Amino acid sequence: MSNTELHTLGVAELAAQLRAKQVSALEAAQHFLARARQHQNLGAFVSINEEATLAQARAADALIAEGRGGKLAGVPIAHKDIFVTKDFPTTAASKMLEGYKSPFDATVVKKLADAGVVTLGKLNCDEFAMGGANENSAVAPVGFDSAQPVRNPWNTERVPGGSSGGSAAAVAARLAPAVTGTDTGGSIRQPASFCGITGIKPTYGRASRYGMIAFASSLDQAGPMGRSAEDCALLLSEMCGPDLDRDSTSLDVPAEDFSKNLNDSISGLRIGIPAEFFGEGLAADVRAAVDAALKEYEKLGAKLVPISLPRTELSVPVYYILAPAEASSNLSRFDGVKFGHRAKNYTDLVDMYKKTRAEGFGDEVKRRIMIGAYVLSEGYYDAYYLQAQKIRRMIADDFQAAFKECDVIAGAAAPTTAWAIGGKSDPVSNYLADIFTLPASLAGLPGLSLPAGFGEGGMPVGLQLIGNYFGESRLLNAAHRFQQATDFHLRTPAGI
Ligand SMILES: NC(=O)C[C@H](N)C(=O)O
């Protein structure tokens, strides 16, 4: 293969070529950096540090030469700009952190580096991961002077989804073979579905949150996004594992080889179909693609089992109480004292806090801080926060009842395909679009989105698979078997 086509390779193929020294890590890094520049109109990257990337690539080549390279030695990836990194600035797409340089790498970043990856740069996202369209980024992407919405490579007038919109756009445009994302209420699965790629959020607590800038700590999880389940499995195997000293919610569950069961037969797999995921509100084009994907699963030997997740609708108000409540607490650390933005002119300490936060945070972040402070305040705590916690528990229980009858649960990842940039200005309409991803988030369950076909205007449709706790391997297996039988994940947008 000529080096001009390296971007057509997935992680598995590229890693094999690197190991066989058919291509060097340096060549791969240079190729993808050039692509990032060539397609910078998408706004996917917020920082690139060519020198650091090339130094990492040379180091990877040296290890490969000595036969000491890790499993992913020399594979170039990029990180959502919510993970702190030593070699690149970290902004969380907020003005609040403009110019911030972390003294350490997030655990997930470090683990992937230990496996040999080379970091291409940092990817755009919604500010502090709050959003579902990547229109809330407050920082200028590479090649721009001011903040821009990220563009969907399938149609640059459409959103890529969010909050990991830069991550999804980068994979869809083949600017990186795979990337990291984070998912609080759907931020990996929904952009994966909008951009026609694969993404998985593991069981809550599987991947360390250390060095992942906190939004809603009881929900935030890291995960990989790539072209295929096979590529996601390779990354996820390196990203997970206990980090008990650094993350108090990290689970003491050993890392797993998620590639091991990819090829298992799925004959007899019971796929639960929740009635509530197929009701009013699901767009006809998305429904048609999902139905066709489920037929394909039947051909592969799976059985469709009707189930009910009766509190699906409540997941939206419950999430939009709990996530802002946690955010209002987490974001109180951004006060202009120790790091990040500080207002220039102020009269006293309180005035400094006020001005710093008024200048540093964008509208959506302020909205959530206000909602969060309100639902936690005396007199409202019982009515909102406590009530939401109770319903969260019931949502988790509903899943356990459903998993008595099925092995995995399937439905659309989002009710529609990607909408037009600027098309959903009302925040509530954005929140409602999260309805299918929120239940698994609230329950802490693993969820995956895989390309399942195309809808109106040729936009990708994602099928979501939800597993029981620690069921990542089964989800990846089910997705891989589907991808062996279909080619949706191999298709690329025009001009890519
Ligand atoms: N962060 C996420 O997982 C996305 C969700 N739409 C939110 O804005 O909270």
Image: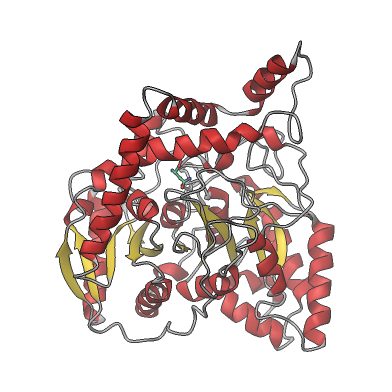
The location of residue 470, given as percent across then percent down, is 41, 70
Q: Quadrant of residue 281?
A: top left
| Residue 14 position (above or below residue 312) | below
Say whether residue 352 is visible. yes
Quarter of the figure with the C terminus: bottom right
Identified at 69% across, 71% down, the residue is 4
| Residue 205 position (above or below residue 315) | below
Identified at 64% across, 24% down, the residue is 357
| Residue 149 position (above or below residue 25) | above
The foreground one among 78 and 437 is 437
Identified at 76% across, 55% down, the residue is 104
The location of residue 221, given as percent across then percent down, is 51, 56
Quarter of the figure with the N terminus: bottom right
The location of residue 118, given as percent across then percent down, is 72, 67
The location of residue 280, given as percent across then percent down, is 18, 44
- Left or right of 348? Residue 226 is left
Q: Quadrant of residue 419?
A: top left
The foreground one among 262 and 191 is 262
Say whether residue 146 is visible. no
Q: Quadrant of residue 241?
A: bottom right
Q: How many numbered marks have been drawn onto this rendered protein structure? A: 0
Q: Check the image and name the residue furthest to the top.
A: 347
The foreground one among 34 and 264 is 264
